[in-house]
């Protein structure tokens, strides 16, 4: 196969560094809306650095599997054809949407993705706050059908990198709204702020990578509302900056729940985050329902015996 | 992994250090004023919607608060320039260690191991039941 010589993420790293410097300096001068807390920034950037190491350690298996599938492909898709790039752009972006959606809706995938959401801040450093354990959840399997169709692995890897780099710049409060036509088609700072917010109305919305049209198509779109400012982070925010706890807390919590309640292990592993066998915790759907139904406002909520889960 | 990778990793780690130093220098965290009872109650209502609050104790440094809600203790604790909230059984809050004006609450959560709340006295005499 064609060796991957271009890694968009590596190429973009100097740009990441420069733009974070600019965001901090402009915020300091009062010229841009941004807030950075020192320990939070350190954790976000360390998670980003750690995720590149984890990517190198686990990348071999994923590349080998993708290659193997591609060798058994249905069609020969040429990297030189313009239509092939249009097709991979759309198919990869839709794959990302479903990967991202399952990462929020099922705890087994949430245990890794939670890392990206555990900051109470929303700035460019938050974009680099990436999981260390994503490869272990097997979500990379979702991209194998593209190789099976016949897209060369290098092409898939390149498009995945382009998507990751695109999603970097939208992690900012410095940009309000883009032009209307742009907000209609593309994922933007405004749409992704909603995705990172813990306000019930914003939970489990805007899963898009590059195109927001998937959320509009599949019913998960929520515009940012001026009367509902985004509060960022998890439903139950972290109370620690210890990087080991930050990286693994939800894995440990999930394993603990499954071991304590073996008869309900499947629910605790594959149910939505916040699911519990005795109704003592709340899922995003329950939180949303409670927030929108005034009748439930007087209710006392669940009677938890154990600490709550953290769906976001 | 080759030498190039380690060079890149080293450079990235240095960049991380520089960016964290820059963020510290800029002092652009969110301004957090200490909690008072009014703010604590507001935050409790947001974090535990619909829960009845029987009593609130606000930390003397404003960096946290503890509320009783029936059989539960609702805990707010400062994390950086934000707050985190958890709930534990009231009996555990009553039994928590209190030394030198600091109440150490075991929150029994990997993501929120302990909360330390500065209080003049603990447990409260009238609510210790
Ligand atoms: Zn997400
Ligand atoms: Zn994000």
Image (spheres, rainbow, N blue to C red):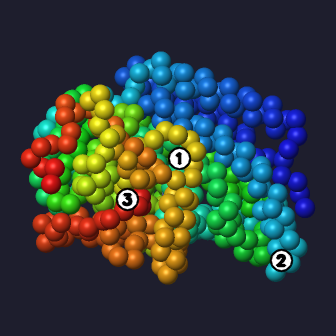
Q: Are marks 3 and 2 on the same chain?
A: yes
A132 or A190, nearer to the observer: A132
In the structure shown, which secondary structural element does the residue marked by tag 3 occupy?
A: loop
B88 displayed left or right of B114: left
Q: Chain of mark 3?
A: A
Q: Are marks 2 and 1 on the same chain?
A: yes
Q: Chain of mark 2?
A: A
The CA distance from mark 1 to mark 3 is: 16 Å
A125 or A309, nearer to the observer: A309
Look at mark 3 in the image and give the residue it sits on.
A307
The residue lying at 48 percent from left, 51 percent from top is B110
Please say whether residue A124 is visible from this viewpoint: no
Q: Chain of mark 1?
A: A
Look at mark 2 in the image and give the residue it sits on.
A73
Labels 2 & 1 near each other (Cβ < 8 A): no
Quarter of image, res B125 = top left
First-in-chain label (1 vs 3): 1
Look at mark 1 in the image and give the residue it sits on.
A246
**Residue B26 image label:** none
Labels 3 & 2 near each other (Cβ < 8 A): no
Labels 1 & 3 near each other (Cβ < 8 A): no
In the structure shown, which secondary structural element does the residue marked by tag 2 occupy?
A: loop
The residue lying at 11 percent from left, 53 percent from top is B54
Q: Position of residue A28 (x, y in %)?
A: 41, 21
In the structure shown, which secondary structural element does the residue marked by tag 1 occupy?
A: helix
B113 displayed left or right of A141: left
The answer to whether the residue bearing label 1 lies less than 8 angstroms from the nearest atom of ligand 2 is no
Image quarter of the C terminus of chain A:
bottom left
């Amino acid at each position: 196969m064609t060796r991957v010589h271009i890694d968009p993420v590596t190429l973009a790293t100097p740009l990441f560094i420069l733009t974070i410097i600019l965001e901090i300096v402009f915020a300091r001068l009062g010229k841009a809306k941004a807030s950075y807390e020192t320990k939070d920034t350190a954790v976000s950037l360390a998670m980003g650095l750690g995720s590149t190491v984890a990517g190198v350690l686990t990348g071999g298996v994923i590349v080998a599997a993708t290659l193997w599938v591609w060798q058994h492909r249905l069609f020969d898709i040429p990297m030189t054809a313009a239509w092939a790039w249009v097709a991979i752009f759309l198919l990869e972006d839709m794959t990302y949407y479903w990967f991202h959606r399952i990462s929020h809706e099922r705890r087994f995938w949430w245990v890794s993705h939670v890392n990206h959401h555990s900051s109470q801040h929303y700035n460019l450093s938050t974009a680099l706050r990436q999981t260390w354990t994503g490869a272990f959840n097997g979500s990379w399997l979702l991209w194998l059908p593209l190789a099976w169709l016949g897209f060369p692995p290098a092409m898939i890897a390149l498009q995945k990198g382009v998507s990751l780099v695109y999603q970097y710049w939208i992690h900012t409060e410095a940009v309000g709204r883009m032009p209307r036509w742009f907000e209609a088609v593309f994922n933007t700072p405004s749409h992704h702020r909603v995705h990172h917010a813990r306000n019930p109305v914003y939970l489990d919305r805007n899963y898009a990578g590059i195109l927001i049209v998937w959320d509009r198509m599949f019913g998960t779109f929520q515009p940012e509302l001026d009367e509902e400012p985004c509060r960022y982070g998890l439903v139950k925010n972290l109370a620690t900056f210890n990087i080991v706890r930050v990286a693994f807390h939800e894995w440990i919590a999930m394993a603990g729940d499954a071991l304590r309640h073996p008869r309900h292990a499947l629910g605790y592993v594959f149910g939505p985050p916040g699911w519990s066998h005795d109704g003592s915790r709340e899922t995003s759907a329950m939180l949303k329902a409670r927030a929108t139904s005034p009748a439930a406002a007087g209710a006392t909520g669940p009677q938890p015996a154990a600490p709550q889960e953290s769906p976001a | 992994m080759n030498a190039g990778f380690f060079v890149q990793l080293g450079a990235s780690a240095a960049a991380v250090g520089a960016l964290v130093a820059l963020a510290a220098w800029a002092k652009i965290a969110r301004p957090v004023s200490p909690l008072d009872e009014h703010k604590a109650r507001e935050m409790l209502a947001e974090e535990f919607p619909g829960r009845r609050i029987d009593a609130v104790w606000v930390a003397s440094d404003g960096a946290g608060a503890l509320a009783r809600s029936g059989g539960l203790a609702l805990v707010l604790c400062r994390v950086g320039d934000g707050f985190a909230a958890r709930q534990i059984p009231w009996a555990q809050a009553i039994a928590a260690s209190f030394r030198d004006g600091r109440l150490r609450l075991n929150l029994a959560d990997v993501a929120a191991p302990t909360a330390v709340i500065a209080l003049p006295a603990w447990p409260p005499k009238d609510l210790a039941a």
